[in-house]
């Protein structure tokens, strides 16, 4: 099991940047693929990005490709999401989650452990 705590959210103008962090604890972090998912008001939770346990492979939703960058530092038990060129439609609660090592990274049901989320609000 992995315990996750997100930070770094906030209010930013369109075109701005944020760096989200997810601090993890638990013995399985370094062997777990990790993902970021988000949920906007009135919408279903959606996949944003994922990274393999080694950091060697990354995956992105088409809507964020080229603007978001996921990375991890296993020595620090931390996963990051660099968000650039923010748009109002990026407004959502962003969740960090540990993948259960089964199934697609793009399916939220394949994540076993979740953080509490961090709010990102983009003003136009």
Image: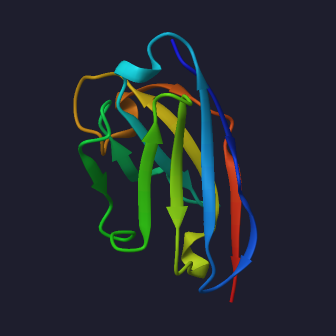
Farthest residue toward the right? 11
**Residue 26 in the image: x percent, y percent?**
55, 13
Q: Is residue 118 left or right of residue 44?
A: right
The C terminus: image quadrant:
bottom right
Q: Front-most of 80 and 73?
A: 73
**Residue 41 in the image: x percent, y percent?**
65, 61
Residue depicted at 34% across the width and 42% down the height: 51
Residue depicted at 28% across the width and 52% down the height: 59
Which of the colour schemes (rainbow, by chain, secondary structure, one colour) is used?
rainbow
Residue depicted at 49% across the width and 10% down the height: 27
**Residue 17 in the image: x percent, y percent?**
61, 74
Farthest residue toward the bottom? 124
Residue depicted at 49% across the width and 34% down the height: 97
Residue 117, by quadrant, is top right
**Residue 8 in the image: x percent, y percent?**
71, 54
Q: Looking at the image, how many numbered discs can be counted on the residues? A: 0
Q: Can you say whether 44 is above or below 16 in the image?
A: above
Q: Can you say whether 108 is above or below 63 in the image?
A: above
Q: Is residue 73 left or right of residue 114?
A: left
Q: Is residue 1 left or right of residue 17?
A: left
Q: Front-most of 88 and 22?
A: 22
Q: Is residue 92 left or right of residue 112?
A: right
């Amino acid at each position: 099991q992995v315990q996750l705590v997100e930070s770094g959210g906030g209010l930013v103008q369109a075109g701005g940047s944020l760096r989200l962090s997810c601090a993890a604890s638990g013995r399985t972090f370094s062997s777990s693929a990790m993902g970021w998912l988000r949920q906007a008001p009135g919408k279903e939770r959606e996949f944003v990005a994922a990274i393999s346990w080694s950091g060697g492979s990354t995956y992105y939703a088409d809507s964020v490709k080229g603007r978001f960058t996921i990375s991890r530092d296993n020595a620090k038990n931390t996963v990051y999401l660099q968000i650039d060129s923010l748009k109002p439609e990026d407004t959502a609660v962003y969740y960090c989650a540990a993948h259960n090592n089964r199934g697609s990274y793009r399916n939220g049901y394949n994540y076993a452990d979740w953080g509490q989320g961090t709010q990102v609000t983009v003003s136009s």
